[in-house]
Structure formats: structure tokens, C-alpha cells
Amino acid sequence: MAMRMRQSLAQLEQAFVHETQQDRQRREHLRRTAARRSRRRAYEREQARSSLRFALLVFSLIATAVIVTVAMFETLNMLLA
């Protein structure tokens, strides 16, 4: 009976150690996954901001070109009139 109880305790202890290791691995995997997801979201936010800034830059360049062209022709019209 004592031998059987020792085996049973040893098995329980071994099962506990195994479960603890699995728990640690699971937590580490979840942490890595969350970190990866966070980095990906930050990258996507930065991409969206960069796209918006680029669109504003293009718009301002086009607006500047239009304003300069209109001003140039108005000046030319005043000089020739």
C-alpha cells in the first residue's frame, strides 16, 4: 500500500510539474502573440498616417501650382493690358 501511495504521489507531482510547464509555455505564447499583434497595429496606424500626410503633400503641391499659375497669368494680363 505504501509503495502504491508513493507511486501515486510521484505521478501527481510529475503531472503537476508537466501542467506547470504547459502553463508557462501557453502564457509565453500568448505574450508573444499579443506583442506581435500590437506591433502590427502600430505599423498599420503609422502607414495610415503616412498615407494621409502624403495625400496632403500632393494636394498642397497641386494647389500651389494652380495658385502660382493663376497669379502668373493675372500678372501677365495686367502687364499686357
Image (cartoon, rainbow, N blue to C red):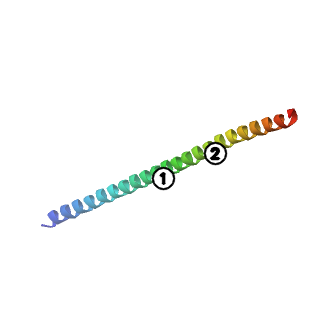
User: Is label 1 in a helix, a strand or a loop?
Assistant: helix
The percent position of residue 32, horizontal first and vertical second, equals: 44, 51
- Amino acid tagged 1: Ser
- Which residue is outermost to the front? 81
Between 46 and 78, the one nearer to me in the picture = 78
Between 7 and 36, the one nearer to me in the picture = 36
> How far apart in space, not on screen, are marks 2 and 1 (Cα)?
27 Å
Taking 19 as reference, is 49 above or below it? above
State the residue position of label 2.
56
The percent position of residue 1, horizontal first and vertical second, equals: 12, 67
Give the side of residue 51 with respect to residue 20, left or right.
right
Taking 7 as reference, is 50 above or below it? above
User: Is label 2 in a helix, a strand or a loop?
Assistant: helix
State the residue position of label 1.
38
Q: Residue at x 62, y 46 (%)?
A: 53
Give the quadrant of the C terminus. Answer: top right
Crowd class of label 1 (few under 14; some 14 to 19; many from 20; radius 10 Å)? few
